[in-house]
Structures are given as structure tokens and as C-alpha cells.
Amino acid sequence: MKKALIGIFCFLMAFSVCAEEKVYLWPGKKGPGSENFTAKEVVKTKDDRISTITSISEPYFTVQKAKKAKNKKVGIVMFAGGAYAEVALKTLHDVAERYCAEGYTCFLVVYRLPTENGHENPMLVPLQDAQRAIRLVRSQASKYGIAENKIGVFGESAGGHLAARLATRYDEKAYEPIDGADTVSARPDFQVLRVPAFNKINGEDVPVIPHVTANTPKAFIVSASDDTTAQVKNNALSYFEALWTQGVDSEIHVFQNGGHRFDKDGTNRVWLDLSVNWLNEYVK
């Protein structure tokens, strides 16, 4: 009997540790312009973890809280890649786990995709969700144990484009204000971009680099010289150059090998350590 009680206790403890708070971005759950989108969300898993999500009309974020003993009171709003055709969460979970262990609270955003929803302005949809996500986090900063002026973004691949788009167009009116959360700033305090892809989306050019100003938040950027999906010259390096020209404090690491997924042998394996070091040093 004693062993059974211990087993139940351990199960409940494991569940409480792994449980994630889910927060829908919009009142009524559906995002603006997606009210008539009726497709059911499709979730694919791999190794017992969510791998990709599509058919998203009810965007949300999940919260992974910082390790209490190390809590730095910093929030990171995170956007996965997926070429704007899916939200590919597998890598994002691994990154979030490391950041949480280092004392950062992470908010993993499942945002709407421009290839879905039948929205009259498809490429506005992800920006709407990105702005709303950071405003919700900032408006409830005390609830999450973070500081209002220490909330940044992380993005990889297409998510890197979305994070950078938010960092450069945070004051663009992407939707009509809904509640008190929309009265706070959508400007990130910092940005971490992994293999950002500023390529055309659905054949449409959605520029980011021309919108860099002296008010764009500081950035940590990492890429690989053999990335053929988001070639470093026209993506990571061009963005860094624009930041440098505007006097924005930034750091870039371009690895010799890694490809777009950093799944090749080489020194690219230390990229996460480097990003943690940058956060620890420059986000205080």
C-alpha cells in the first residue's frame, strides 16, 4: 500500500511539473478575421511531444515557468518556424526547456498561418497574433513573475521573420484594440533569432530589414554559412548590418556548418550556450 501511495504521489508530482498553462490570445478564442474559419486544428506528435500544428483559428500560448531558484524575472515570447505553412514546435520545446532551467519564463506561441483562415490580408494574421501575445504577457507580467521591461522574443526560421517583424513593426496598427491589454506596448525589449528567414512568403515580399531603426531592440542572431533555405547573406547578415548601421547593440554568430536546422556536425552545437550567455550578460 505504501509503495502504491508513493507511486501515485510521484505521478502527480510529475504531472504538475510538466503541466503547461494555456492562454488564448483573443476573447472568444478566434482571432480577428478568422471567425468563419471552421477547419479543426491538426496536431501531429513525435516521440510523445507535439511536433507540428496546422489549421489554427484559435491562437494561444503555453507558459513554461522559470526555475524558481534561478528566476531572472525575464520573459521570452517564442515563435516556431515552419515556413508559415505549419507551426513546428519540436525544436522550440527543447530551447524553452534550457531557457527555463536558466531562469527565463517562456511563452510558446501557436500563431495563425497566412496560408489558412481566408483572411483578406493573410500576412497581417501572424503579426496580429504576435502583437497580441506580447501585450498579453506584458499586461500580466506580475502574474508570471517577470518584469514589464524585460520581455523579449525568440524566433527561428519563419518564426525568426515573425519575431523580427514584431521587433521592427511593433507600433504598426495590425488590429483594432479589444481590451486593456492592447493599451500596453508591443515592443520587445530584446530579440534572439535563430536562422531567421526573410524570404518571400507565399510569393509575397513582407519586408523587415527596411524597417530597422535606432529604436529596434537589441539582438542576438545565429546562422550557418551553408544554410541554403535562409542564405546568411540576405537574411541574418543583412539584418545584423541594418541593426549595426542604426547603432543597435547586437551580436551575430555565423557557423561554418549547420544548415538550416543546425543538424550537422560542427561548432554549431554551442549556439544555445552562446545565446544563454548573451541573455545573462545583456538582459538584466
Image (spheres, rainbow, N blue to C red):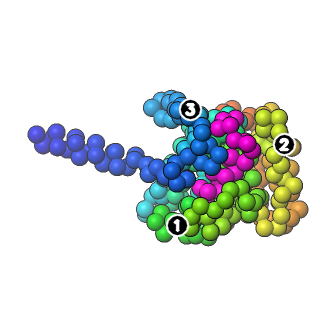
Q: CA distance from mark 1 to mark 2?
A: 34 Å
Q: Which residues are magenta?
A: 115-135
Q: Real-space Cα distance between discs 3 and 1? A: 33 Å
Of the pair 270 and 85, the residue shown nearer to us: 85
Location of the N terminus (image quadrant): top left
Q: Label 2, on which residue? A: 205
First-in-chain label (3 vs 1): 3
Query: Which residue in the protein does label 1 denote?
Result: 141
Please tell me whether mark 3 or mark 1 is closer to you in this view.
Answer: 3
Q: Which quarter of the picture shows residue 39?
A: top right
What residue sits right under mark 3 in the picture?
A: 39
User: Mark 2 is on which residue type?
Assistant: Asp
Residue 218, position in %: x, y?
Answer: 74, 63
Looking at the image, tell me whether mark 1 or mark 2 is earlier in sequence order: 1
Residue furthest left in the image: 1
Q: Is residue 35 magenta?
A: no
| Contact between labelled residues 3 and 2, with CB atoms less than 8 Å apart | no
Q: Position of residue 120 (x, y in %)?
A: 73, 42
